[in-house]
Image (cartoon, rainbow, N blue to C red):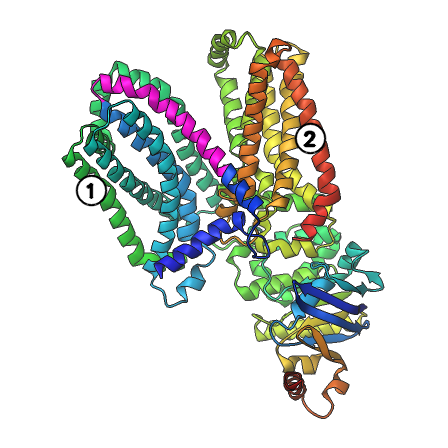
Amino acid sequence: MLTIEHLTKRYGDKRAVDDLSLHIARGEICGFIGHNGAGKTTTIKAVCGILGFDSGEIYIDGKSVNREPLACKRRIAYIPDNPDLYDFLSGIKYLNFIADVYGVTAAERAERIRAYAAMFELTGDLAQPIAAYSHGMKQKLALISALIHEPELMIFDEPFVGLDPKAARIIKDIMRERCARGAAVFFSTHVLEVAEKLCDKVAIIKDGRLVAYGDMDKVRGDSSLETVFFELEEGAAHD
Amino acid sequence: MIRKLFVLNLKALLSGSLKSRSGGKSGGGKLALVVAVGAVLAAMVFGMLMVFFWSMLAPFFAAGIGWLYFALLALIVFGLNVVSTIFSASALIFGAKDNDLLLAMPIKPSVILISRLLVLLASEYLFALVVALAAFIPWVVGGYATAAGVVYFFIDIVLLPLLALAISLLLAWLLGLITSRLRRKNLVTLVISLGFLFAYFYFCFNMQRYMQELVMRGEEIAAAFRTAMPPFYAFGRGIADAGLGDVLHFILWAAVPFAVTVFLLSANYRKILTANRGAAKIAYKEREAKSRSMLAALTRKEMAHYLSRPMIILNCSFGALVMIIGAAALLVKSDEVLSSLAAVLPALGGVNAAALCAAMLLFIISCNNLSASLISLEGNNLWIAQSLPAPGPAILMSKICAHLLVTALPCLFASVCVGIAVAQNLADWLTVLIVPQTFIALTAAGGLAINLHFPKLDWTNEARVVKQGLSATIAFFGAALALIVLGLLYGLIFRNFISLAAYLWLCAVIFAAGAALTFLWLIRNGSRRFAGL
């Protein structure tokens, strides 16, 4: 579903992402782990077609992000780590706007908005302006807007930040359910326990380079993901 | 700390003009452009005011009401400061995005307040400087100045913005208080703001008549002035008659309201910023969903943003408001307008009335510069537009559509009203209907192209984009300057060869060609530039 080949992105002299390659198949959930400034958000933004890159290729369902950006964007849903939404719209107007841009029919959007808003307990607030929403409510609205067009690849940057436990549980269930139906999920997180329990694959990035990547069981081995992560961090520091 | 916060606010104010998006320092070219735009703007205002003050100097001093010369100076500075600061005060003092961040820091709320007040004061002093110099030079050159008067002039002019700022703060706070509980707060804010603006412009447009009445009924009006506006009377008397008592009187008028306002605000600043005034919750009722085209959805989003902010409506589409109100007034008072036109036309060499109205519409259109702010207004929301499967040209086109809705429709209404009032034949109708629309197309596309070159996305309040953004400034004054140049070209050269109507059609062809070329650039290069922001 997602293939990244030798992705390199520079900011001036600094290589924010350096020769990064990975592949996520349909039905897989891949966690993306690294310290702050390691290159996670840069990679994610490049995958979503928001940020250009210097070399390499990114394919979504076999289509190049560079050559067919719109076809790729139609297949994905992206939520940044701090979703700033249009605070001059109400929740329902924002969802309708997103549905219009993705070409979701009136009947489909009505059904999905009803279901997801009830699931996230946001129905009663849909008429409120987004400016009146709390951070968690904005996060929930962003999640509903991301799901409204039934994306094949969900890309989330720190999706659990600001969510209450129930909403966090729901989003994990949705990830699994979407993957069971052939979609894929690529998300960054600092919560290693969540990644360990939820992900089929894990990619660990340090200073722009992928230092570990593969099936969760293989990367983790007999120890915990946390132990592996800190060993890699320390190992890289000794190098 | 005050100095640090002041510098921070000032940097935020200037960052859109002087820094690149990546945060690096700008090149000399951009800085030169900012300086040039500022200089042209200041020179234009300065020139107009200087002519105004020169015309008043001798008659007023000869009539023994020299104080009125300075009282009017004070009134102009005060009016300009209040009108220009009220929205900035509302946005910067009460609605800044970094309120929570700063309140969480070990900084006294009063320090945050004062650092922001200093930024507002700095902009007020800029206005005051331009107006004060335009009055000061004729006064000194005309030989009416005294040494003590000059000293008092500087003391008073330094204090005057304090009074204006106190009133602006009060009005901005009242505006926020009144509208916070209302469902239609945007509409109410817009109506109140328009009331202020039109009252101010009404006063300015009638200045000439007031001047004539002043000269004829000087003592009578001066007495009224003295009673109704004592601070301005004290201001004028203190300078013209070098009266220390009047100067002290004015110092009290300026300093006391300012001190009281600042004291009350700083004592309650945290409470004001964190007050939840409990706007009523809007109940959600599911309605039948409707799907729209992508362009319609994007345009509706732009319009929702525009309509949600009275500050954007007033600053980016003042021309549209003038066109709607002016056109309605034209229908109601067409006899008076036609007789005024009949009086003016012979002095202009008997130009066609419809052509003259079309030319006036062009100037009003130049006050609408919405498209020059629409990319900057995306701010932190830019990720949404960039991650959506919407082609760049569609996103840019939606911004053009918003500009056209806000400008072309009111203009069409105004053109029809003008046509009903003055058109004599089909050619007149076509002139008032088509020529302005070509200019609208050019300003819509041109504004967007300018904003793509000078985007400011890291703002903390929208007023900085709309009121102080380089892109909005260039678009506004660029359009006005272009029309002035075209007007001068006609007055000095072309009027000898062709009629005004023919000249306007020539301009329309140029506008249309310019608009077409800019549209092409937007589609080919603009969308790439947008994607790279």
Mark 2 secondary-structure assignment: helix
Which mark is in front, 1 or 2? 2
Q: Nearer the viewer, residue B242 or A215?
A: B242
Q: Quadrant of residue B453?
A: top right
B376 vs B210: above or below:
below
- As drawn, the label of residue B514 is 2
Q: Is residue B501 left or right of residue B2?
A: right
Left of B213 or right of it: where is A129? Answer: right
Q: Residue at x 80, y 64 (%)?
A: A57
Tag 1 secondary structure: helix
| Callout 2 crowding tier (Cα within 10 Å): few <14, some 14–19, many ≥20 | some
Establish if A233 lies above or below B5: below
Nearest the viewer among B271 and B145 is B145
Residue drawn at x 48%, y 14% as measured from the top left: B337
Residue B167 in the figure: left or right of residue A23: left
Is residue B60 one of those drawn in magenta? Answer: yes
Residue A80: percent from left, percent from top: 63, 64
Predominant SS of the magenta segment:
helix
Q: Position of residue B81 (x, y in %)?
A: 37, 38
Q: Position of residue B339 (x, y in %)?
A: 48, 9
Q: Is residue A114 visible?
A: no
Q: For mark 1, what is the residue? A: B252
